[in-house]
Structures are given as C-alpha cells and as structure tokens.
Image: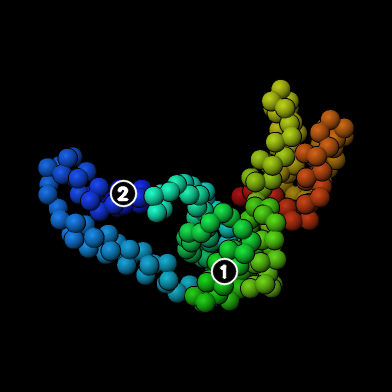
Amino acid sequence: MQGLYARGMSVDDIKSEIDELYGIDISPSMISKITDKVMDTAAAWQNRSLDEIYPIVYMDAIHFKVREEHRIVSKAAYICMALDVKGRKDILGIWIGGAEGAKYWLSVCNDLKNRGVKDILIACMNGLKGLPQAIKAVFPEVNIQNCIIHQIRNSMKYIPSKNIKAFMKDLKNVYKAVNETMAVQALEVLETTWGDKYPVAVQLWKNNWEIYPLILIFHQK
C-alpha cells in the first residue's frame, strides 16, 4: 500500500488496486489512516535528535520524477549518510526538494545543526558549485572532500569509448595509490600519457587535487 501511495496514486486508486488484486474491500478512510500512521513515523525519524559530532558525512542527491497536482515534475532526494564516532553508518535524514542546488543543501545543514550536530570533521560530496561554501556557512571547521566516484565519472565524459579501458588503467594507479606521494607520481604519468589527447580529463584531477588526497586514502580501506 505504501508503495502505491509513494508512486502518487490517490486513495481511490489504491482502494481499487487492492480490491482487484486481493478481493479485499478497504474503505478510503482506512487507507488514509494507514498512510498517515506511516507518515507520522517517518516524520518522527526525520526530526530525531542526532549526535554532536560525526567524523564523516556523505552528501548526495537522487533525482526522480513524481506526479504532483496532475503534472510530472522533477524532484531531488537530498541524503546525508554519516559514520558516527563508533564507525557505524547512519542515515541522518532524507529531504525532498526541487533540482539539486547549494541553497537547498544550506537548509539541510541548518536542519542538522538544529537537531544537535555541532561539528562534522569531513564532508564528502560531489562537485556541485557553491556546496562547500554552503556547508562551511553552518559548520565552518569542516574539511571538504569531493567524492572520488563523481570525479572519475566526470573525467570519463571526455574519453572516447575506444580509449576508456587504457585510460582507466592509468587512472586507477592515481586513485588506488597507497599514499599521496605515489598518487602524485601516477598523476604525472597520466598527464604524460594522455595530457595532449585529453587535457580536460587530466586537468580535472590537477585542478581539484587539494580536495582529493584524503579520500584517495579512504578509498583503499
């Protein structure tokens, strides 16, 4: 039932679907009570108190289409996944908004702070413009680390399919290096081999190098 509700079906549509599938006649009011109960539980989870400190928080958005007021519109689910001080994963919240933007992420960070978060040591994110500034406005001492997966995907946009395998072989030596020194050496090899053919793909790593070394280390673990 909740899956049907999440897909934008009306109460009457859900009633008809259940009746057709299972031969059960459920009143619209009963369906509303069930969905409202689940929504209350979800709201309580979304607004729960959080820890004061999180060593790492991963921030990303998932984009999807939904039906809203008889129209199909684009939405983004803003998700914060954290590692707490004991190393356990926790989803801090899921916020539904419009197209992904730094302004909405600012409201997400304010919500985290209002729910008890005082400091984030490392925030891992994609390269969305303005996002680091939005996070630092709420948590000024946070260290910003761009997501290595997003960086790989961005650089591969500039590589033709015939050379992807060879380019990736050299690129892996960069982001799988055991330390920053070896990563820098691998980056120099990457530039020597591919810099003339695909300068943008290589330059993406050089331009953002200062925000990647620590994530390169975490990627090995």
Visible residue check, residue 86:
yes
Secondary structure beneath label 2: loop
Secondary structure of the residue carrying tag 1 is helix
Q: Amino acid at mark 1?
A: Ser
Q: Residues within 10 Å of mark 2 (few under 14, many from 20)?
A: some
Residue 153 picture quarter: top right
Instruction: Mark 1: give few (<14), some (14-19) or many (20+) Cα within 10 Å.
Output: some
Three-letter amino acid code at disc 2?
Met
Counting labels gives 2
Place of residue 70 in the rendered image (x, y in percent of width and height, measured from the top left): 39, 50
Decide: is 40 above or below 99. Answer: below
Give x and y (percent) for residue 200: 80, 39
The residue located at (39%, 54%) in the rendering is 69
| Residue 172 occupies quadrant | top right
Q: CA distance from mark 2 to mark 1?
A: 29 Å
Q: Which residue in the protein does label 2 denote?
A: 9
| Percent coordinates x, y for residue 5 in the rendering | 31, 52
Judged by depth in the image, the label closer to the viewer, 2 or 1, is 2
The residue at which mark 1 appears reads as 107
Question: Which residue is painted at 12% across and 47% down in the image?
Answer: 24
